[in-house]
Image (spheres, rainbow, N blue to C red):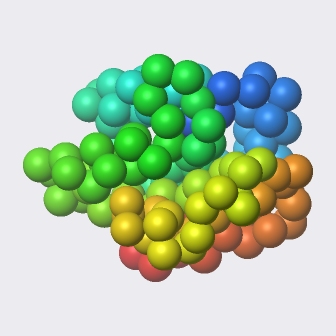
Amino acid sequence: MADSKKVLIAEDSSVIQNLTKKILEQQGCIISSVKNGEQVLSALEKENFDIILLDINMPVMDGMECARQVRALPDPVKANIPLVAITGNAKNYTMEEFQAVGINEYLPKPLNFDQLVEVVKKLTNKA
């Protein structure tokens, strides 16, 4: 990636968080990570990100509610950040349900890291 993309990983599993971080850092991304949707919103108050990877099943605030709240932010730049759902329960949701809350793409768990890199590149190189 030409310039470093800032990626926010919202994932309550430390293992997945660390693996994802390592993979994307190898691609030149700058990574921040949080454990739930509330922390995503707090992080967004402090800085901008190019993309958010959002686990759907997190404590405190899940990924679906977090996506709704990100899309409702008053700052149009932050409200339009690409959102990628990461879930082991993709069968519980349809792509239409993800799109209804503003999620751009979804990746099933276990993560395919080549697919992860591809989706991050695709969604962050639109600018």
| Percent coordinates x, y for residue 116 in the rendering | 75, 61
In the rendered image, residue 85, in percent from the top left (x then y), is placed at: 59, 55
Q: In this view of the protein, can residue 25 be seen by the observer?
A: yes
Image quadrant assignment for residue 94 = bottom right
> What residue is rendered at 67% in x and 51% in y?
86
Vertical placement of residue 109 versus 58, above or below: below
Q: Left or right: where does residue 7 sit relative to residue 44?
A: right
User: In the image, is residue 112 above or below residue 26?
Assistant: below
Which residue is drawn at the image coordinates 40% and 75% (left, top)?
A: 127
Q: Which of 125 and 75 is in front in this view?
A: 75
Q: Is residue 46 above or below residue 111?
A: above
Of residues 38 and 5, which is closer to you in this image? Answer: 38
Q: Is residue 46 left or right of residue 117?
A: left
Q: Which image quadrant: the N terminus? A: bottom right
Residue 107 seen by the camera: no
Residue at the spot 73% in from the left edge and 71% down from the top edge? 118
Instruction: Name the residue located 47 percent from the left edge and 66 percent from the top edge.
Output: 97
Task: Single out the residue that lies furthest toward the left.
Answer: 74
Q: Which residue lies furthest to the front in this view?
A: 92
The spot of residue 98 in percent (x, y) is 49, 64
Q: Position of residue 123 (x, y in %)?
A: 54, 71
Q: How many marks?
A: 0
Q: In this view, does 67 lie to the left or right of 35?
A: left
